[in-house]
Image (spheres, grey):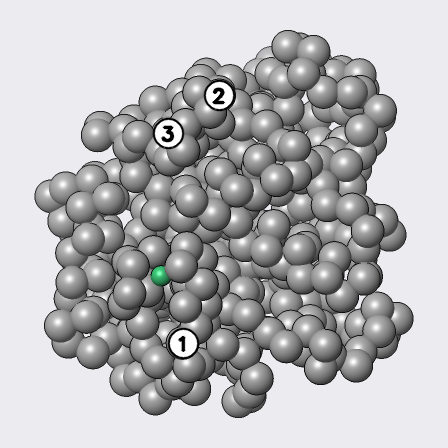
Amino acid sequence: MHRLVCIHCKKVYSPESVIYTCPACGHLLAVEYDLDAISLSRSDLLARPLSVWRYRELLPVTIPPVTLQEGGTPLYHLKRIGESLGLPNLYAKHEGMNPTGSFKDRGMTLGVSMALQLNMKMVACASTGNTSASLAAYAARAGIPAVVLLPAGKVALGKVAQALMHGARVISVAGNFDRTLEMVHDLCISHGIYLLNSVNPYRLEGQKTIGYEVIDQLGDVPDRLVLPVGNAGNISAVHKGLTEWQSLGWIDSLPMMTGIQAEGSAPVVRAIKGDLPEVVPDVNPETVATAIRIGAPVNAEKALRAIRQTGGLAESVTDEEILSMQRSLAQMEGIGVEPASAASVAGIKKLVEMGAIDPDERIVCVVTGHLLKDPETVIKQCSPPTEIDATLPALLSALQL
Ligand SMILES: *Cc1c(COP(=O)(O)O)cnc(C)c1O
Ligand SMILES: [Zn+2]
């Protein structure tokens, strides 16, 4: 049995309570388990298929889960990019290979399962895109209605297409992501709808399995785990999960948690570099990487702790660096990701060029979403197909053969 614990004042709440922040102090909640009661060993786990649900004893769901077979994503060695950077041990965990094309599915299999376990009849979220695509699909799988709020004009085409096709009520708000999150939060509290943004502690429980899978696939704890940071839920989730494995004695060190943000939306980076006690939000965040276009990350408190406690780093990259790494991943490695995802690898490139990391480190970059999520940004970067008449000579001439 789990309980909810405030990350700030440590007050404990029952697992039946539908709350997202601590009623006593207003800070976020985290799920805690009685780890002493877990009688499982690491080798028991390794006998199961690689997926979110391999780790079910460290998850709060007790009913049959709402699942589309999430997790079990590939870990690729980045041989060519690694060589070009002088990093022989550089890897990418491709979370774009999840059912709806982003790591958000790990959170939604948990979140929507918990919605049913808690007898909630309707789910909602605000989203930069992927959360809404994922929620729409998992709500459809569960047979319950979903409402999603999107910042108008700032969501990649593939993500809107998914949310619409999976049958969510899609609302476009004339405001930025941070404002849509406030609105959906108010709506959920006043109307008894289950909120599935990353303020929801259960979503993060699913996302923590990224770290577990990385260790199971690599056979060891990497020296550094690198994630793009938006709302800062994912980096916090992975760190929390690994802390649990450390408490269980399953691993004896933690990777240096490293967060990468876009230059136009980098409050976590500024807080780490400036040694600030908390983040100062960006009022008008801007970046081509819309999935991390978030000025006031709700999980910043957890993320700052994760980075600081593990001796990690935070760095920002320009849109140009992000798009250039998106092309390198696609063309040098065959790995298609959306812009936000390329930020993690672009960040490592920058850090290694700054001399901030040891080239012998074993580094795993989480690439968070699939190339097809944002076809418009891709098309803008590529020259269009060559058009020819339907003759062989025209083909040979076009190919200059
Ligand atoms: C949600 C998302 C992120 C940011 O994750 P946070 O948990 O908000 O920090 C990064 N990349 C992609 C593709 C995403 O969908
Ligand atoms: Zn509290």
Quadrant location of the C terminus in the rendered image:
top right
Crowd band around label 1 with a 10 angstrom C-alpha radius: few (<14), some (14–19), many (20+)? some
x then y, percent, for residue 393: 61, 19
x then y, percent, for residue 332: 70, 26
Label 1, on which residue? 13
Dot 3: element: helix
Q: Which mark is residue 39?
A: none
Dot 1: element: strand
Label 2, on which residue? 273
Tell which circle, 3 or 2, labels the residue nearer the N-terminal end: 3
Spatial CA span between label 2 and label 1: 34 Å
Quarter holding residue 139: bottom left
- Would you say residue 301 is visible in this rendering? yes
Name which residue type carries label 2.
Answer: Lys
Quadrant location of the N terminus in the rendered image:
bottom right
Name which residue type carries label 1.
Answer: Tyr
Closest to the observer: 360 or 157? 360
Crowd band around label 3 with a 10 angstrom C-alpha radius: few (<14), some (14–19), many (20+)? many
Query: Nearer the observer, disc 3 or disc 2?
Result: 2
Task: State left or right for residue 83 relative to residue 313.
Answer: right
- Would you say residue 210 is visible in this rendering? no
